[in-house]
Image (cartoon, rainbow, N blue to C red):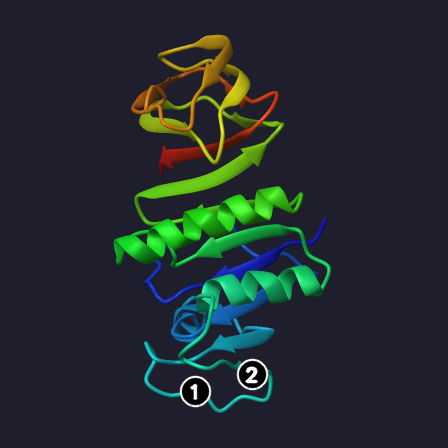
Amino acid sequence: MNRCFIFGALPVRSMTDLPDEGDYVIAADKGYDVALSLGLEPDLVVGDFDSRGMAPDVDNLVRLQIRKDDTDVGHAVGLGFEKGFSDFVVYGAVGGLLDHTFANIVIAHEIAEKGGRSLFIGDDYSFTVIRNGEINFPPRDGGRISIFALGRAASGVTIEGLSYEAKDLTIPCTSHIGVSNSFVGKPARIAVGDGDLLVIRQNP
């Protein structure tokens, strides 16, 4: 399945996941400069360009109003769905302004609600939201990983291969019981039977 890569405004030190042939690249506002710095020519550039200062001189441009009801990254995700993509990899959108990072968690939740998948990758941490499904990790020694229920209680939560394991756990959306777990050198699996889980992991 082809993926939609989106670049936000934050600098990206390195890319752990690269676009393949057939993948689609969207630059959101200053993410245009970020994509270019990584040697990528975006298929589409979108934004109000308040952070960049001016719109780039390109033909594949979607110009947004500054006063609007979504962020540039959120609008880029919507355009990705319109173009038939449901698997998103987002760089340059974790860290920096806390409110924008939280907005991107909300966007990841929305992607999961629509049946899609996402991975928001930062320099230090990455996150995704899984709905009624599971996520698997290869063995690694050390590194933090946390899970939180979003919107409502998450039931049937199973955690395997981490420092703290669980089976058929119910996590209320007001609970922080899933914070600060860790990798222990084993293949790891997190699953949820019913509900939405935010999974935040420290990058290797």
CB atoms at circles 2 and 1 under 8 Å apart? yes
- Report the residue at 42% width, 75% height from top: 29
Q: Tag 1: residue type? A: Ala
- Report the residue at 42% width, 28% height from top: 173
Nearer to me, 63 or 56: 63
Q: Is residue 104 above or below residue 167?
A: below
Precedes in sequence: disc 2 or disc 1: 1
- Report the residue at 58% width, 48% height from top: 111
User: In which quarter of the view is residue 19 placed?
Assistant: bottom right
- Report the residue at 55% width, 68% height from top: 26
User: In which quarter of the view is residue 199 placed?
Assistant: top left
Nearer to me, 165 or 172: 172
In three-dimensional space, the C-alpha distance between marks 2 and 1, rounded to whole angstroms, equals: 8 Å
Q: Which residue is mark 1?
A: 55
Residue 115 falls left or right of residue 188: right
Q: Is residue 8 above or below residue 181?
A: below
Residue 50 falls left or right of residue 137: left
Q: Quadrant of the C terminus?
A: top left
Residue 95 falls left or right of residue 32: left
Tag 2 secondary structure = strand
Tell me if residue 23 can be seen: no
Residue 195 on image: x %, y %: 56, 28
The dot on residue 61 is: 2
Q: Tag 2: residue type? A: Leu
